[in-house]
Image (spheres, rainbow, N blue to C red):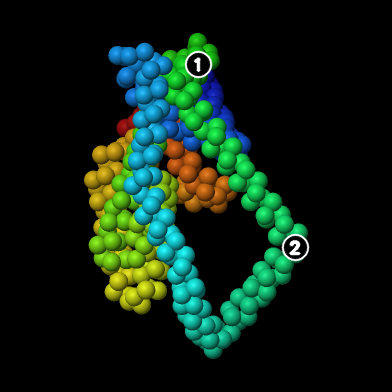
Amino acid sequence: MKHEVKVIINKSIFAIVFIVFFFLILYVLNKLFISFLLAGALAYVFSPLVNKLSEKIPHLLATWIVFFLIFLLFSLLLFLFVPLFTEQAISISKEVPKIWKTISIQGGKLQRWLMTHAPDLYSSLQEYETRLTEGIKPATKIVAFFATQIYAIFRRIIDLILFPFFLFYLLKDFEKIKRWIKGIIPGKYREEGGRLLHEIDRILYGFIFGQLLVALILGILYALGLAIIGVPYSLLIGITAGIFDIIPYVGTVLGFILASAVTFFYFSSLKMVLLVLLVFAGIRVVEGNFISPRLIGGKVGLHPIFVVFAIILGGKFFGLFGMLVFVPIFAIGKVFFLDIINYYKNSELYKGAKADETAIGS
């Protein structure tokens, strides 16, 4: 039994180390080379296609075909959506003064209501506004802000240049990388380690590929649904919601807030806002019952409560990046957790305790 306890402890330590190491790699890549991270995600999704083509044609030729196919798909999406997207973005930017005026009027009404009915809360908000204003006054902070933005733009340009390079070579050598990872597992643990890696690979592929497709479909459905009920800038809002739905539920919430705000400012009608709610709720029902079960199914295998918890936890500590990666990290954690539980239930430690309980009961 001591041996079995030791195995369970070792499995738990290995699971923790693996998950932390996996997260640190993603975190460092996100900070240094986001192009490598994005190229890795795309290579991971499309590498099975390269392998399939490699059965009939040379591997290098298969890599080039898939590489150009990816850029063709991106070019097609840009050609179809960017002109309309840009047109609506320019149009809404011209409406910002009108929207801001509406916000100011409504804000003035709220301010007067607070002064009359909740003076303490109004005083607290005024104090917070003063502190915020004082905090952003120094010129050094303004200079630092612009310096940061210049650095961010420069970094994005470098990422854009490196992205095709990373994508091609990751597509070409992805299977070699996977074999190398399996090869460094000690021989004693290779069979069990290979089984766990295969399960993790299945979950990650299912999540990344499935979530990308779901986000694309939801973006199109949001845009169509909002256009049907007459919401202005439906394409802009729908595609934005679809992009953010790469993180489960986030795009839906963001899209509903944007669509409701625009609808209320343009129509001043709660009935229209209710229609927006029905559009988003209806699409989520369709997604939950038909789209995700067929595209993702049980591949990730996390209860919605754990998905929401992973998103909140990731967002709290690591912002948008954390929200994006914590769901698959939780799913990987589930693989290790089930492995430990299954080992425990098949061990004498568990069977012996169960036998003792039966003996006492009799």
Who's the residue at 53% across and 15% down the image?
184
Rendering coords of residue 65 (x, y %):
36, 24
Residue toward you, 279 or 203: 279
In the image, 279 versus 207, the foreground residue is: 279
Q: From the viewer's perspective, tell me whether residue 180 is left or right of residue 82.
A: right
- Looking at the picture, which amino acid does disc 1 mark? Trp
Asked if 156 appears above or below 86 in the picture, the reply is: above
Name the quadrant containing residue 146. bottom right
Residue 201: x and y in percent read 41, 27
- Is tag 2's residue or tag 1's residue first in the polypeptide sequence? 2
Which quarter of the rendered picture does the C terminus lie within?
A: top left
**Left or right: 127 in relation to 83:** right
Left or right: 18, with 240 as reference point: right
Q: Residue at x 58, y 40 (%)?
A: 157
Residue 264 falls left or right of residue 170 = left
- Residues at circles 2 and 1 in contact by the CB criterion of under 8 Å: no
Q: Is residue 290 visible?
A: yes
Above or below, comparing residue 109 to residue 346 in the picture: below
Q: Position of residue 321 (x, y in %)?
A: 53, 45
- Name the element at disc 1: helix
* Number of numbered markers: 2
| Residue at the spot of label 2 | 139
Residue drawn 75% across and 64% down? 138
Q: Amino acid at mark 2?
A: Ala
Residue 231 place in picture, x, y as percent: 32, 66
Secondary structure beneath dot 2 equals helix
Q: Judge by depth and name the residue closer to the eye, 285 or 65.
A: 65
Residue extending furthest toward the top: 187
Give the label on residue 180, or none: 1
**Most extreme residue toward the bottom, as rendered?**
116
